[in-house]
Amino acid sequence: MQDPQDAQRQLLYQLQILRQQHEMLQNQLEIVNASLNNLLNTKSTVENLRDVKDNDEILVPIGGMISLKAIIKEPEKIFLYVSQDVVIEKNIDGTLEFLETLIEQHKEQTKYLSQQLQKVEVNLQRLSQSMQGGM
């Protein structure tokens, strides 16, 4: 038979692991949501390019609260960075399709992480109840 103190230590250890998993999943979910919001903003910006003509002047954000005025040349040509070393050229529709694929992947990842988070929360609750019952 297991010593009650050993059993209690084991439950505490399991509780600590579940809390770490919970925090890790929450952090991952925040990162994916931030990336998803960035993709949605990018998609909106690309959709707005349909109204931009050659030589139109626009404001281009360069970081923080700083923007530059820029003259647009060939607004229908968009360059996508698909990796650190690879850039491809697409038109507006092709870019929107690419972005929509990424958005759907992010939504699936968000759903998966949310489900995993719920499972961990259920396990945390059960373990907490077990510990309270054993005290």
Image: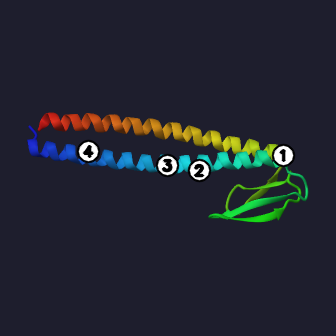
Residue at the image position 61 percent from the left and 41 percent from the top = 105
| Colour setup of the view | rainbow
**Which residue matches tag 4?**
14
Name the kind of residue labelled 2 in the image.
Ser
Q: Which of the 4 quarters of the picture holds residue 5?
A: top left
**Which residue matches tag 1?**
50
**Which residue matches tag 2?**
35
Q: Are marks 1 and 4 in contact (CB under 8 Å)?
A: no
Instruction: Indicate which disc, 1 or 4, sits on the residue closer to the N terminus.
Output: 4
Residue at the image position 52 percent from the left and 51 percent from the top = 31
Name the kind of residue labelled 1 in the image.
Arg
Mark 2 to mark 1 CA distance (whole Å): 24 Å
Instruction: Indicate which disc, 2 or 4, sits on the residue closer to the N terminus.
Output: 4
Mark 2 to mark 4 CA distance (whole Å): 32 Å
Judged left or right of residue 102, residue 53 is: right
**Which residue matches tag 3?**
30
